[in-house]
Amino acid sequence: MEPKVMIILGSASDFNVAEKSIGILEILGISYDVRVASAHRTHEKVKKIVEESTANGVEVFIGIAGLSAHLPGIIAANTYKPVVGVPVSVKLGGLDALFAIVQMPVGAPVATVGIDRGENGAILAAQIVGIHDAGIRTKLSKMRREFFFKLKNDEEQLAEKLTGNYYSRHSFEIDELETTKEDDLVESDDTGYPDVAVIAGSYSDIKIAKKTTKFLDKLRITYNTSVISPIRHPKKFEKFMEETKAVKLYIAISGLSAHVTGAVVGFTEKPVIGVPCNIRLGGLDALLSMVNMPPGVPVATLGIDSGGNAAILTAEMLGIGDANIKQELLDFKGNMNCPDN
């Protein structure tokens, strides 16, 4: 059985992070392989692993690295398949690795998750595989319900420790099956819906959203576009998510505290690509808000203002199961490498 996911570590010392990824892939029943190769010390080995794995049917790569962390970028340079990057905290709290992985140039996107978040790297990889595999989507839905029950148990244990005289516990009736229903998962294969929902959190994010849709048009990927804030208009946002539940993935574009991506992942188990915008603080506020998601709800975060890479990553994800999009992607990347472009 050929692996669907290839995990490449920049160093054997990164294995503690890789173990988190492996645990998730084992639970979901997704085949994988694990290799150790350095982008700097064994460049040719990385290239050979990536090129042969791409040819042999690997669908997603996970690159795990710390320090200067060029490994995920080198992987992306040698494949048209999606690459998930997991920065490792070795020095500087992992920020050096995070910035090295996420700030990729146009044409070689890396879907970056939080520092040391190997589990989110694997969940994101599973979501990508699940775009074209209903069985994996069902397993992801079951996993999400298990996260719900874990939090419920944590709350009950916490309640036992609350003994104050004025502590008054109120009972809330909450649907334990908050996650996507199985009939929703089947609907995602409906060809009557666009492939992608592009969401801008504010009209100030429109410039980056237009850059994204311009690239989507070039790649012939169908989409709809909306400007909607989960903070200013929560009920409207919830209705929007219900109406777009059959798309294959979401692109969320936002600056400042960037709550849009977190709100989207709260409503879906499909891949969510996040593009932070430079509104204040050089966009670092939005970047860190998007990438540092808790376990179970990853955002495929790209570099600041990287609208073009969001579209290219979308094509890489959709091209796994769509030959037409795959060809458009290959043609597009080929043209980008021409001297006249």
Image (cartoon, rainbow, N blue to C red):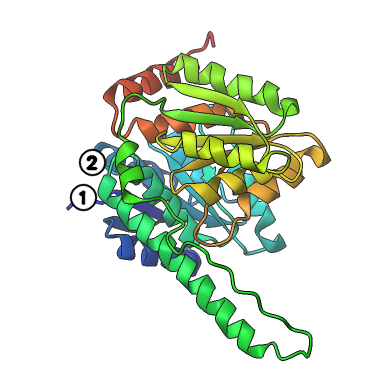
Above or below 23: residue 61: above
Q: Position of residue 176 (x, y in %)?
A: 45, 64
For label 1, the residue is 2
Is residue 55 among what the camera can see?
yes
Task: Answer whether labels 2 and 1 touch (C-beta < 8 Å).
Answer: yes
| Lower sequence index among marks 2 and 1 | 1
Q: Quadrant of residue 234?
A: top right
Residue drawn at 26 percent across, 37 percent down = 55
Residue drawn at 63 percent across, 42 percent down = 235
Q: Label 1's element?
A: loop
Above or below 215: residue 178: below
Crowding near pointer 1: few (<14 within 10 Å), some, many (20+)? few
Query: Which residue reaches farthest left?
Result: 1
Q: Label 2's element?
A: loop
For label 2, the residue is 56
Q: Out of 340 and 99, give the one closest to the viewer.
A: 99
Residue drawn at 55 percent across, 20 percent down = 213
| 321 on left or right of 116 | left
